[in-house]
Amino acid sequence: MTKFFLLTRPNYDTATSYLHFFAKEAITIAKKLKGIHVSDIEGNRVTRPNLEKIFARENPKLVFLNGHGDKMAVWGHKDEVILDSKNISLANDKIVYALACDSLAGLGDLAIVQGTQAYIGYQENFMLVADPTRHASPSKDNNALPFKMVCTKLIGSLLKGSTAQEAINITKREYIRLIKTLGTSEDVYGDVFLVRMALAWDLEYLDMKGNPDACFAA
Amino acid sequence: MIKDKVDVYQEQKELVLARFNAISPESKIILGGDKELTVKDLISHVEKGDDFGRKIVQTQIRMLKLLTSNA
């Protein structure tokens, strides 16, 4: 039976351009796995009506939201609120992974009350370090690479059938591995220091609400 | 016998500030909302001891523990 996977990837400023690039890997992983239909809403198509339309049409069981956010909302293109208290009930019975700031702390709780199986996200700002000379080409930015690796680890684990809690545990181990193995030689500008700091921050605040056994493969 | 109570947080804060002061003050991190913070900004938060600054100290100390553990 085909399973539906939805992701949103706005791309209109530095932070979203990096998340847009990170999330591309999720599409590659999903397409390699059998029986997964991918709906990729990206760029200026990341609007509230488009999200609601795909929720209604495809009823995706796994939803991966990338972009900015706050405690009570996840945003799409140019800060349009695409998911908040008014439409969170559409995430009923789904696993949501929000790679957006803060939303786990408020919207995550509300989502579970409204029937979302599991809501994975960050209790605080999501932090990343980028090389300012590479903002135009995130794929060539070595500072951002560790952040891409942890994001890919999480969504990849969910796509491959790990439960929500297992996916978090796997990702936290990846954070720790990266923090411990990043080199410090020739760190003239303190890039490695900051990358470690930001990884430690994200490790601290990654968490989930809802059913730890929620599983996309089930 | 040492009678003065050791202010652990103050010591942790000084350790974190010493580490931040060793790198370029203009290096930046990206926070959600497309905000950028320089090392100088981070130092300011830690020095002021605001909520964000205290969280930075806390996560830095946990990171140092990770780096020195064998786990």
Image: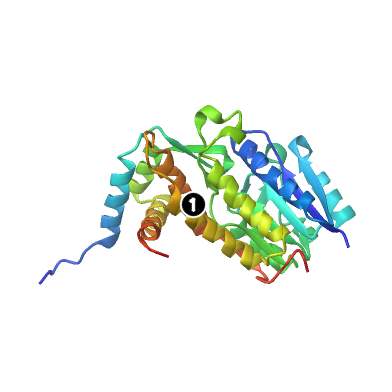
> Which residue is labeled 1 in the image?
A178
Q: Quadrant of residue B27?
A: top left
Residue B65: image location, x then y, percent: 36, 60
Question: In the rendered view, does A122 fall on the left or right side of A4?
Answer: left
What sort of colour scheme is used for the picture?
rainbow
Rendered residue at 55%/35% (across/down): A141
Residue A70: image location, x then y, percent: 61, 50
Indicate the quadrant containing the C terminus of chain A: top left, top right, bottom left or bottom right.
bottom right
Rate crowding at label 1 as few (under 14), some (14 to 19) or many (20 or more) other CA atoms within 10 Å. some
Indicate the quadrant containing the N terminus of chain A: top left, top right, bottom left or bottom right.
bottom right
Residue A33: image location, x then y, percent: 78, 55
Rendered residue at 78%/64% (across/down): A92
Rendered residue at 78%/45% (across/down): A40
**Depth order, front residue of A50/A61:** A61
Q: Chain of mark 1?
A: A
Rendered residue at 55%/49% (across/down): A126
